[in-house]
């Protein structure tokens, strides 16, 4: 056991009790909606966190890289959805995971990819479990639910002996919502789009047993998931300032923070300098387009309480610049050299990615454990 004062900074802190409350909130919300929960592990990339999210030790989970699939399968997880459209240079990696007993579900959204999969299946006697990605909000990849290609791809694969198990979507535009009503409307838009695509496939003779939706905002604000079989979400486990900025969580529900130390001042500019720059916080400025811009992170005292409207207004590689959000110089709180602060991140995924481990906080604020995490592809 360590105290925070003993940690060399910057260090990634995880409030375990708050994390558990966040997980319990998601489970409680989804349970009456009658869906399977397939948590996304890209946020934390840690088996210690995943075990607290999964329904069983075998999964199910969602990943965004095949390295994540490798890591979690090495810890006994066998039911994995790889939620990025598959590329042909990953077919060998997929085969290696399958050979280890992993049921790895892939996604695609084009006939071009479907043809490459069929060629691979025929040349290597390889089987695939597939979902077609649906674009429910114009956010990024996927096919519109009414697109002829949805049925065309499924029929092409079926004729080649490859079964499409269903459809999936991600309502990434939920991050742009600015009210609870807008979040509820986006959740319904997501549901309706993917269910419609599934109904079209069934009408064409494709069974489509899997109908998968997912984003933290829509998962927590959905009130009706009729026709959906599973929900995916990831950042809810920690939350962050972006989620707080759209009303999905409160600031005091953010479980992740970066411990930093004051190393100097620029009194003429109202600055306090920290040993945590963008290498510690990431360059993510996800709150910049929100009503409250949190800079590179919200500044809290060592116990996690926000301090005097201070934020990380600037970040060099290893230097963070703390100042009052108003830009005022006179009367800004003086924080002596050596003072430890906690910085709440804009985006938990990108901040956590800078670190090899979590320093896990116990009920009395001491570091009770360290949990390893990994990065890369």
Image (cartoon, rainbow, N blue to C red):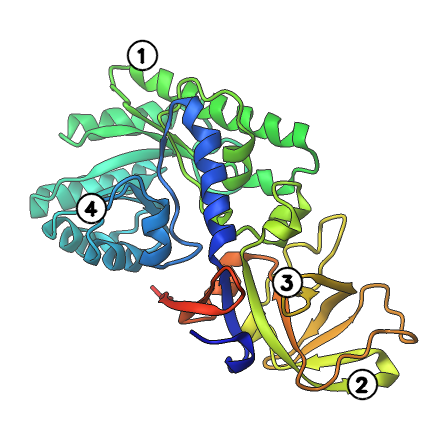
Q: Look at discs 4 and 1 and give the one toward the viewer.
A: 4
Report helix, strand or loop for mark 2: strand
Q: Contact (CB < 8 A) between labels 4 and 1? A: no
Can residue 107 be spotted in the picture?
A: yes
Q: Which numbered tag is attached to residue 78?
A: 4
Residue that mark 2 sits on: 266
Report helix, strand or loop for mark 1: helix
Residue that mark 3 sits on: 304
Q: Look at discs 1 and 3 and give the one toward the viewer.
A: 3
Q: Nearer the viewer, residue 65 or 44?
A: 44
Please state if 271 lies on the left or on the right of 58 as rendered.
right
Give the x, y percent position of residue 51.
Answer: 32, 50
Give the x, y percent position of residue 300.
Answer: 68, 65
Please state if 49 lies on the left or on the right of 79 as rendered.
right
Residue that mark 1 sits on: 203
Report helix, strand or loop for mark 4: loop
């Amino acid at each position: 056991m360590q105290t925070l004062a003993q940690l060399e900074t910057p260090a990634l802190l995880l409030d375990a009790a708050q994390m558990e409350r966040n997980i319990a909130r998601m489970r409680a919300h989804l349970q009456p909606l009658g869906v399977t929960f397939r948590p996304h592990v890209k946020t934390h990339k840690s088996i210690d966190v995943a075990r607290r999210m999964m329904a069983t030790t075998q999964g199910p989970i969602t990943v965004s890289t095949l390295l994540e699939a490798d890591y979690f399968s090495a810890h006994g997880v066998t039911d994995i959805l790889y939620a990025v459209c598959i590329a042909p240079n990953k077919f060998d990696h997929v085969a290696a995971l399958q050979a280890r007993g992993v049921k790895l579900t892939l996604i695609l959204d084009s006939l071009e990819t479907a043809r490459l999969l069929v060629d691979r299946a025929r040349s290597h006697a390889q089987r695939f479990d597939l979902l077609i990605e649906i674009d429910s909000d114009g956010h990024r990849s996927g096919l519109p639910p009414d697109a002829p290609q949805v049925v065309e791809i499924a029929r092409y694969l079926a004729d080649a002996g490859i079964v499409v198990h269903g459809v999936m979507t991600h309502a990434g535009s939920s991050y742009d919502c600015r009210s609870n009503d807008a979040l509820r409307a986006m959740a319904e838009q997501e549901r309706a789009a993917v269910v419609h695509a599934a109904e079209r496939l069934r009408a064409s003779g494709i069974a489509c047993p899997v109908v998968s939706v997912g984003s933290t905002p829509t998962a927590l604000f959905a009130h009706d998931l009729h026709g959906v079989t599973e929900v995916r979400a990831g950042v809810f486990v920690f939350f962050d300032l972006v989620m707080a900025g759209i009303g999905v969580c409160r600031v005091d529900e953010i479980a992740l923070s970066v411990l930093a130390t004051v190393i100097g001042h620029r009194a003429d500019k109202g600055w306090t300098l920290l040993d945590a720059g963008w290498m510690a916080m990431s360059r993510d400025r996800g709150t910049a387009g929100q009503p409250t811009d949190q800079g590179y992170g919200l500044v809290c005292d060592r116990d996690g309480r926000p301090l005097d409207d201070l934020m990380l207004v600037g970040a060099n590689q290893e230097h963070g610049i703390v100042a009052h959000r108003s830009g005022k110089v006179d009367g800004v709180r003086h924080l002596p050299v050596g003072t430890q602060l906690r910085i709440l991140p804009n985006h938990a995924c990108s901040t956590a990615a800078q670190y090899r481990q979590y320093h896990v906080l116990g009920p009395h604020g001491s570091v009770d454990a360290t949990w390893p995490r990994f990065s890369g592809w």
